[in-house]
Every structure is written in structure tokens, then in C-alpha cells.
Image (cartoon, rainbow, N blue to C red):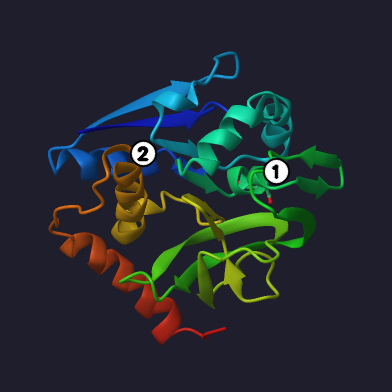
Amino acid sequence: MKLRIGHLYPDLLNLYGDRGNIQCMMKRCQWRGIEAETVEFALEDSVDFQNLDIVLLGGGSDREQMLVCSKLRSIRESFQSYVEDGGSVLAVCGGYQLLGHYYKTEEGTIEGLSLVDLHTEQGSPRLIDNIVLENSDFSLPIVGFENHGGRTYIGENKPLGRVLYGHGNNGEDGYEGVLYKNVVGTYLHGPLLPKNPHLCDYLLSNALKRKYGIAELSPLDDSQEEAANRYIYERFVKQGTPR
Ligand code: GLN
């Protein structure tokens, strides 16, 4: 078995080491004897989504988002077919905002891919903090760090989790991120996956199921990953002020 991970525009969308998410996915495949390969795409490259099993769209500043947005519009149709066909996507922060219809900033409106029915508006102050989520479909909390000016509104879509500590999508409704088909959109920067092995395996098993019809992943020794996750949970939820 082999998974191909596509990293879209790492030169522009790679804030806070979002690339670490790819290393985590590669490692968790290799530890299980599943081959994994990463293909990086620059702005001038064409993207053949038919050859990809997981796509990472990382975070970027408003300026960088503006630079990639016209390119993204040109690959929109094939990206949309990939998503509708159940292709796995991890979109972080700026990448998450670009999944939606638009991101409205003081400098102008950045048009998104409209792959998921959501939109973002810039607000003040920036929402910066550690963050902890719960989602009863996952065995562990989801922990990370957020830093965004945008407030995202996901309408009727399913969130990635309920905020136990931190701000989330817009600092108002108590939810963070989005789950749409096999797309995970989130403000959690990173790298997000090393401390959230359950989320990494969610992406991998969705990709394997689509490609090979196999969703079962062999268990790994996650004691260190779980200890890192527990540390954040205990520091901010148990000892901190829950929201
Ligand atoms: N530029 C976006 C914002 O500030 C996303 C930032 C990011 O990816 N950290 O909301």
C-alpha cells in the first residue's frame, strides 16, 4: 500500500512549521509498513489530484494568501472533484480560510475555493492562545495553538470540535474548525498532528479506505504523543479557566 501526500505551495503556505504535519503522516505510515511519498507543488506547477491521497494546505499571512488565491481559483474544479470524491485534505489556518467562499480583510477580499460552505471576516484583536477541543468521535482531546485575525463562520457544517479552552472559529460560538466529507479545516497550528495522533490516523485511514477499501490501521506505541496531549489538556483545561 502506498499513500501520496500533496503539499500545496509550501513556499507561501507554511507558517509555524505546518510542514511537520507531513512528517508526522509519513512516519505513521512508515512505522506501519505503508509506503508514503510527499510531492511539493510550487505556484507554477500543475496539480494532478488524481494521483494524490492526502492534500495539505498550510497557513499563511494575509499577503501570502492574496498571492496564492488566484492560483487556487485556477485549480478549483479539479480540487473540488477530489474533495467530492472523498479525497483527504488537511487545511490549516490561512489554508482553512481559503477552503471557504472568501476572507474579507481591511486590505480587500481574498476569494476562496468555495470547496466548503464557510466564510471568514477579519476582526480585532487577533485570536492568539493555546487551544483544546473535544469531539466525542475521537479518543483524545485535540490540542494546539491558534493565531488568527479572521473569524470563520461554518454555517450548518460540522465543526472539528467544541472549544474547551481557547477561541476557536470566531471567538463567539464555542466551536473550532470544520469537518466536511474527508476535509479537516482548522485554525490549529503546528505542527498539529504530532500531539494529535488520533487526528493523523483519521486522515490516514480515510485515505486508505478511499484507495484500498481498508480503514483499519495497526496500533502504534503512542505513549509519548499521548503524554504531550495530556500535558496541554491538563495545563489549560484542568488547571486553567474553561470556556
Ligand atoms: N492570515 C490569516 C489570519 O490572520 C491566517 C493566519 C495564519 O495562517 N496564521 O487570520
Q: CA distance from mark 1 to mark 2?
A: 24 Å
- In this view of the protein, which residue sits in the foreground, 114 or 57? 114
- In this view of the protein, which residue sits in the foreground, 231 or 153? 153
Label 1 residue SS: loop
Is the residue at mark 2 in contact range of ligand 1, meaning its CB lies under 8 Å from it?
A: no
Q: Residue at x 51, y 35 (%)?
A: 82
Res 212 quadrant in image = top left
* 121, above or below 26, in the image: below
The mark closer to the camera, 1 or 2, is: 1
Q: Residue at x 12, y 38 (%)?
A: 33
Name the residue type under label 1: Ser
* 122, above or below 62, in the image: below
Q: Which mark is residue 22?
A: 2
Q: Quadrant of the C terminus?
A: bottom right
Q: Is residue 226 left or right of residue 69?
A: left
Whether residue 14 is visible: no
Q: Residue at x 32, y 71 (%)?
A: 140
Q: Is residue 40 left or right of residue 148?
A: left
- In this view of the protein, which residue sits in the foreground, 81 or 108? 81
Q: Quadrant of the N terminus?
A: top left
Could you say where residue 56 lies in the image, as x and y percent from the top left? 47, 38
Could you say where residue 155 lies in the image, as x and y percent from the top left? 71, 64
Between disc 1 and disc 2, whose residue precedes?
Answer: 2
Q: Residues within 10 Å of mark 2 (few under 14, many from 20)?
A: many
* 71, above or below 198, in the image: above
Name the residue type under label 2: Ile
Label 1 belongs to which residue? 114
Could you say where residue 176 lies in the image, as x and y percent from the top left? 57, 66
